[in-house]
């Protein structure tokens, strides 16, 4: 469904991605592990069209999306939950959700259904729906960022370190919603530093180092053989 | 020597009326600044061009209201086209390039106006000519009308931004352009539309101002400067702050002209600008960010 092949990306003159190749199949949860600064977030930004790759191809459902206008991937069914959450701080919680709801071809009834669904998973968002997004706690903002992505009814969600800096209770809520999305058949590309969570939630895992994918294995294999994890992540 | 109470009251009315027209110009400028992070130095020229389009339409149709609508719509279209053709390619570059581009636009528009309408001032005929007694003055109803109309247009803008899908798109783009794109909001269209709205509001100010001060090809720079001061004092990109700052500065100038000549009273605005920059650089009507 989503396939990156030999993707090279630069920020100005610094070469960040040195030929990244990876693949996500429909409905699959795929982990992307690696130390800070190895290019995990840049990989997601490249998929979203926020940075343009200088070489290689990014294909989504057979279509080349590299260098597409940055508002197009969302229309194709790719949703993005960035590392710093990027909540619209002055918009209310409901207005944040509406940025993904007010698309062409979504009936009022469908909008209500989608809202009800995220309110069911994240009751706190219903309580705070008229509150400005910037007034939410870090964990609540993370939930809002994921809920906002769900408004797009995506076929794949790119999750960038969703559990970073969250309390354990919030982390289990994030784990829970990843399971829910997986059951519903939404594919997930999960960038994480949290190794146990990734090995539990993902079917396959890619490990990145210095801008390339160094290792690729089923999560079960990595759970059984943690030596590789030690080698690349030093944990 | 005390200042008579009636003079203070008259200057209050004057300050409010001038403040509302200035607020209308500054609202468009601050809206554009908020969404593009760039000061539009051609804003005053959009006021001027709106005034001329209004004057021409008024001469053709005889209706002030048609002239007002035609000027606003024409300039909204011109503004959107300017954004899409001149400013869009500069997005994400050094802000200086956009500042220079808008400055270039202002020169082109000024020379176009000189070529098209000549160097002399055009005065628009006001739609209502009545007056009412304000102490020793016969105060024109038209001046009150301009304040009311300016307030109505700003109010409409507020409602448009506050409610409905397009208002959410504009506010989301203002706060985080990249994330707005990632959510599928067509940001290039939003930017062009916002520039168009700002230009349309500038044009409306030009037409409303026409019967008071006349329209000349050189009037733009004065409007740009005043609106710029207002936007800085009110807090860059803050709509409510700009409106309050426009009224505040106009009142200060009006009161200052009680003791000094009106030409010197303008200095009061600059003094406020400098004080705000020294002590509250985020704007007079913005809570200091934590």
Image: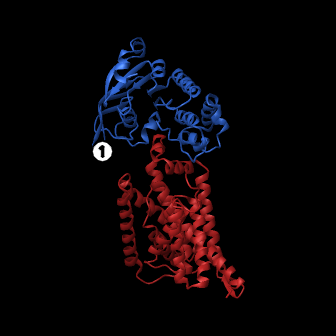
Question: Which colour scheme appears in the figure?
Answer: by chain
Q: Could you tell me if residue B72 is visible in this image?
A: no
Residue visible at 53% across and 36% down in the picture: A145
The part of the image, by quadrant, that contains residue A111 is: top right
Q: Which chain is blue?
A: A
Task: Please indicate whether residue A150 sits to the left or right of residue B218 in the image.
Answer: right
Identify residue for label 1.
A12
Q: Which chain is red?
A: B
Task: Give residue B265's position: percent from left, percent from top.
Answer: 55, 80
Q: Nearer the viewer, residue A225 or A87?
A: A225
- The chain holding disc 1 is A
Up-down: is B276 above or below A43? below
Q: Tell me the quarter of the image containing the N terminus of chain B.
A: bottom right
The part of the image, by quadrant, that contains residue B40 is: bottom left
The part of the image, by quadrant, that contains residue A124 is: top right
Task: Give residue A214's position: percent from left, percent from top.
Answer: 31, 23
- Could you classify mark 1 by the number of other residues whose Cα lies within 10 Å: few (under 14), some (14-19), or many (20 or more)? few
Up-down: is B183 above or below B286? above
Q: Nearer the viewer, residue B28 or B79?
A: B28
Task: Give residue A149's position: percent from left, percent from top.
Answer: 52, 35
Q: Could you tell me if residue B263 is visible in this image?
A: yes
Task: Give residue B5's position: percent from left, percent from top.
Answer: 71, 83
Task: Please indicate whether residue B208 sits to the left or right of residue A53 in the image.
Answer: right
Q: How many marks?
A: 1
Question: Secondary structure beneath disc 1?
Answer: loop
Q: Nearer the viewer, residue A206 or B79?
A: A206
């Amino acid at each position: 469904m989503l396939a990156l092949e030999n993707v090279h990306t630069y920020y100005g003159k610094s070469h960040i991605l040195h030929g990244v190749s990876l693949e996500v199949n429909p409905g699959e949860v795929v982990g992307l592990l690696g130390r800070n600064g190895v290019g995990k977030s840049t990989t997601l930004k490249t998929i979203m069209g926020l940075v343009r790759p200088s070489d290689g191809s990014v294909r989504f459902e057979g279509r080349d999306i590299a260098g597409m206008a940055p508002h197009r991937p969302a229309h194709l069914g790719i949703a993005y939950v960035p590392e710093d959450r990027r909540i619209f701080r002055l918009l209310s919680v409901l207005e944040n959700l509406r940025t993904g709801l007010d698309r062409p071809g979504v009936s009022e009834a469908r909008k209500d259904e989608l809202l009800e669904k995220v309110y069911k998973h994240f009751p706190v968002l219903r309580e705070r729906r008229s509150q400005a997004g910037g007034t939410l706690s870090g964990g609540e903002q993370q939930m809002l960022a994921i809920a906002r992505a769900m408004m797009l009814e995506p076929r794949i969600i790119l999750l960038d370190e969703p559990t970073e800096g969250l309390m354990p209770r919030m982390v289990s809520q994030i784990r829970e919603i990843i399971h829910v999305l997986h059951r519903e058949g939404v594919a997930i590309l999960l960038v994480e530093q949290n190794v146990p969570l990734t090995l539990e939630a993902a079917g396959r895992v890619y490990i990145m180092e210095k801008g390339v994918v160094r290792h690729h294995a089923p999560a079960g294999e990595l759970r059984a053989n943690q030596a590789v994890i030690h080698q690349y992540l030093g944990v | 020597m005390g200042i008579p109470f009636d003079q203070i009251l008259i200057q209050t009315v004057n300050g409010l009326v001038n403040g509302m027209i200035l607020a209308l110009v500054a609202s468009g400028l601050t809206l554009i600044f908020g969404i593009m992070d760039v000061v539009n130095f051609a804003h005053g020229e959009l006021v001027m061009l709106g005034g001329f389009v209004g004057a021409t339409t008024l001469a053709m149709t005889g209706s002030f209201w048609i002239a007002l609508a035609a000027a606003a719509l024409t300039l909204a279209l011109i503004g959107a086209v300017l954004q899409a053709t001149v400013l869009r390619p500069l997005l994400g570059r050094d802000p200086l390039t956009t500042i220079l581009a808008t400055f270039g636009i202002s020169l082109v528009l000024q020379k176009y106006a000189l070529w098209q309408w000549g160097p002399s001032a055009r005065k628009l005929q006001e739609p209502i000519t009545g007056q009412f007694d304000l102490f020793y003055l016969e105060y024109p109803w038209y001046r009150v009308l301009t304040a009311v109309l300016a307030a109505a247009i700003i109010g409409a803008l507020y409602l448009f931004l506050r409610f409905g899908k397009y208002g959410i798109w504009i506010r989301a783009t203002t706060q985080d352009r990249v994330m707005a794109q990632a959510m599928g909001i067509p940001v290039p269209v939003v930017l062009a539309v916002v520039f168009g709205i700002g230009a349309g509001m500038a044009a409306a100010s030009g037409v409303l101002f026409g019967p008071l001060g006349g329209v000349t090809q050189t009037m733009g720079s004065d409007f740009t400067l005043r609106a710029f001061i207002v936007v800085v004092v009110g807090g860059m990109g803050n709509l409510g702050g700009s409106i309050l700052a426009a009224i505040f500065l106009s009142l200060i100038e009006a009161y200052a002209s009680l003791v000094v000549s009106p030409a010197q009273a303008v200095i009061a605005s600059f003094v406020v600008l400098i004080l705000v920059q020294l002590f509250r650089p985020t704007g007079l009507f913005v809570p200091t960010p934590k």
